[in-house]
Image: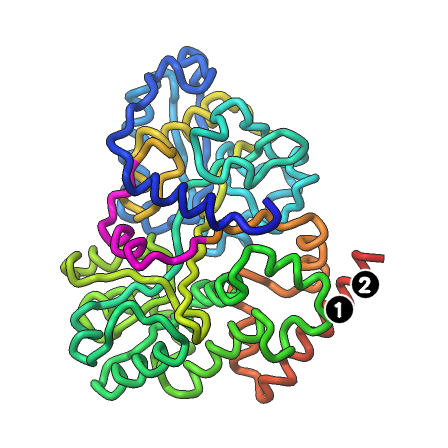
Amino acid sequence: MKGSTKTLARTALCSALSLGCVTFAHASDMGGINAEQVKGAITFYTNRTDLLEDGVYDRYTKEFKAMYPNVSDVKVIGFADYQGGIRTRMNTGDYGDVILILPSVPAEQYSNFYEPLTHLYGEDEIYFHDAWNYKGESYGISMGNSVEGLVYNKQVLKDAGVQVPIKTMDALFEAAHKIKDKGQIPFYINFGAQWPLQQWDKFPLVVEGNNGVYEKMLTQDKPFSEKGSAYNTSLSTLKRLIDEGLTEKDLMTNSWEDSKNAIATGKAGMYYLGNWVIPQVIQQGADSDNIGFMPIPSNNKGELYAQMNHDWGYAVSKFSKNKIAAKAYIKFLIEQSDFDKVSGFIPTLKSKSPSLPQLTEYMDFKPTVIQTPVNSTTFIEVTNRSKIDFYSGGYIQDLMTAKDFNQALEKLDARWERAKKRVMK
């Protein structure tokens, strides 16, 4: 998936928004799975601790066992820090039956940990069919898909005199200051929760305007500190938001749950997150009609870009003792469950329609949609060698709290360059 895929992605997303109701497969015809062989007990390690606590997975277990009476149990275990929780288990062979693929695992190592899922779906049936492919085998299936942008409280922006969509970076900061002048939090970044800071690892893609931005870092001498580079623009934007007091004041406390309430009740104006967060905001009491969604501006030309990406990929452990039941459970989550609706996702199954009206609003602003690329093995190896924990928020916290921001950027460059030299000899 090298090069620009924006036309393909936009077509795919628009098609998803316009399709009608899905026709589900019968339990006896589950992608080559023999229903009579679906039996035994399986364990699923999930990152969605909220759905575990809310009883959603308990409901799924009941529904799945009703479809497959020979399944004795589905044990669901949640990790708030999924990468940290699963990584320690990966070399033991004991990591359940259904798991999520860690982004730190290079493609050529997929077969060491995961079971091929190639036969479950064809390319024309699901989005991101090739996201976890290696040598013709598919090892993962996206649990859901999203576009990134500004989730906003319509009344807050209206009261501050902010017109939508916000099309330029200058207008974004102008809007944020107008909201601040009204006594509300303009931009909730969830600094203390850490993981939401991963958005600023996604922003470079829309800054660059194409999906080659990450591979380009392998050719850049100073991808972090060079002015005008995509990563420098992204991290500098976040730094400016913080320095100008346009975010929550208490940066160190994990206020993730409070932040959803703040957007819902109008104490805060905007999030930069994916559409998956919208149902969670509405669950906090917001009127759905008062929650909007628009692309985030990334330049001063008025050109709007949007990133369409998959979420975690479902996988089956190579060491599972009940692989057929594990595959059937994945197909159940994708086809029969309401997981995409509960999560606010664009469904992975192309014949399913998104349920969020906010996605229609988003596309009405006509952004150029860029599909998230599959990173090369070289990029992943350099990332691992550099020990820069992309998509976790940790290094971004350190960067934003450093005494000298520019010097900290140069240190990231040095780590990246050393890793490149070791990998790209």
Amino acid beneath label 1: Glu
340 shown above or below 154: above
330 shown above or below 38: below
339 shown above or below 123: below
Return the x and y of residue 253 as percentages of the image width and height.
39, 75
Q: Secondary structure at mark 1?
A: helix
Report the residue marked by disc 2. 421
Picture residue at 64% right of the left edge, 78% below the top: 225
Q: Secondary structure at mark 2?
A: helix
Amino acid beneath label 2: Lys
Q: CA distance from mark 1 to mark 2?
A: 6 Å
Asked if the residue under mark 2 is in contact with the one under mark 1, i.e. CB atoms within 8 Å, the reply is: yes
* Residue 376 placement, left or right of 329: right
* Label of residue 13 in the image: none
Picture residue at 43% right of the left edge, 29% below the top: 125
Q: Nearer the viewer, residue 262 or 134?
A: 134
Q: Nearer the viewer, residue 329 or 383?
A: 383
> Dot 1 surroundings within 10 Å: few (below 14), some, or many (20 or more)?
many
Quadrant where the N terminus lies? top right
Report the residue marked by disc 1. 417
Picture residue at 60% right of the left edge, 36% below the top: 133
Return the x and y of residue 369 as percentages of the image width and height.
43, 53
Quadrant where the C terminus lies? bottom right
Total label count?
Answer: 2
The magenta stretch is 353-369
> Dot 2 surroundings within 10 Å: few (below 14), some, or many (20 or more)?
few
Return the x and y of residue 181 as percentages of the image width and height.
24, 88
